[in-house]
Amino acid sequence: MNFAATLSTAGVPAGQYRLVLKVRNPLEAVTPQVLRARPAASRLTDWVIDQWRPALPLSFANTNQGADGWVDLGPLSTTGTCSGDCSAPSVPAGLAVGGVTNTSVALSWSPSTDNVGVTGYQVFRDGARVGTVAGTSFTDTGRSPGQTYQYTVRAVDAAGNVSGPSAAVTATTTGCAGDCTAPSAPGGVSASGVTNTSVSLSWSPSTDNVGVTGYEVFRGGVLVGAPTGTSYTDTGLTASTAYSYTVKARDAAGNRSPASNAVSVTTSAAPAGLVLDDFDGSPAYPSAALNDLGKWTGGNCFLDGGGSGVVSGGALSLRYSNCGWFGSDVNTDLSSRSYLVVRVKGAAGGEQAHFNLSLGGTTKVFGDLTLDGGAHPVITTSFQDIRIPLTSNGISRTAPGQLAMGFWYGGTSTITIDSITFQ
């Protein structure tokens, strides 16, 4: 059976109401006087059939009476001039996550204001109301580990006026539902190369139950790099300065390992004397084709950088295989200088026999140049300053021309030059 009714709100003050409906029991209207007027044999039954079944009476109210038969039909609004409290509270501000566990989220917010008074707050999770509290905090329990939820709050006053929603906040419970195992800590972190502006690090790979996806490098506790492999060069550092590094491994689920051992490194001193090039990126090599004296520089036939070699970590790396040439114009009077100083290292050591050096009218295999005391240069796997006396090697200081290196002596390796200076 379907019922339809048109209700008039004339004379009802404007505001918000709830409409409830009751289908009345016909017996409620039967009085003893009526029943006595009917024959005894059919008093109640005939009276109901004849008088009440054709049109069952309906009763309406604006509050749920809580008695049997009443049905809450939902909110009802009337328009017009409000004669009561029609002002909603202000929107709650400052909603914040105070703390999370693997099964709960704690929230707090600033109190709302109202023309009469705020009586409570409604808390919503992902759009659904999950609680009503009188104060300005709420803890949502029974959550799942490792899940993200969105929360808003509304204020309510005694008249039932409800504010707009607060700004939403999100919270992710702790724990995880998938890969919860962190990789092992990287081992053996060490400095594999140090210049005046850079530190090159390397370490042993970590292991993981699923797979390591990369590493995070920290300088003094601050994240400075995220390589996928087991090495990293930190650049832009200050000369003669101590730094401390640690490394963490991470997997695809975002789990991070404990920190590795810390390694402390001090950058080398800035090049002294007249700098031909320290490969610090100013000027850029070889795009600007200039050295620190503002003159031409470049290279060819090397295996990287389009043949010119590459600058990495503030040093020039020249990888060769019986071919390669590097040149850098000096064309500056060196009468006040006594030494050519090359800060260099090799990939394997012993590279001094793989190339020659030409300067100021002299060309010699690098390992044949004479050092103070009669020794000869030996390139090792660590940076060292090789100080070559100009005069004793027959190098003209007044007309040095171009410093050049040629790699046509049958060698295959890499040398890395941190700086070239005259002192």
Image: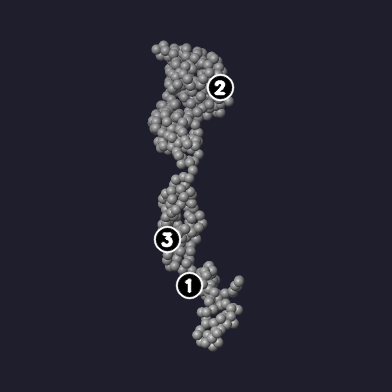
Residue at 55% of width from left, 87% of height from top? 39
Q: For mark 1, what is the residue?
A: 67
Residue at 41% of width from left, 33% of height from top? 260
The quadrant holding residue 321 is top right
The nearer-to-camera label among 3 and 1 is 1
Q: For mark 3, what is the residue?
A: 133
Cα separation, mark 3 vs mark 2, equals 73 Å
Compare marks 3 and 1 and give the one earlier in the sequence: 1
SS category of the residue bearing label 2:
loop
Visible residue check, residue 317: yes
22 or 39: nearer the eye?
39
Residue 240: percent from left, percent from top: 39, 29
SS category of the residue bearing label 3:
strand
Label 1 is placed on what type of residue? Ala
Residue at 47% of width from left, 24% of height from top? 418
Compare marks 3 and 2 and give the one earlier in the sequence: 3
Residue 140: percent from left, percent from top: 44, 55
Question: In the figure, 178 relative to 372: above or below?
Answer: below
Residue 47: percent from left, percent from top: 56, 83
Compare marks 1 and 2 and give the one earlier in the sequence: 1
Task: Say which quadrant the N terminus sits in.
Answer: bottom right
Label of residue 302 in the image: 2
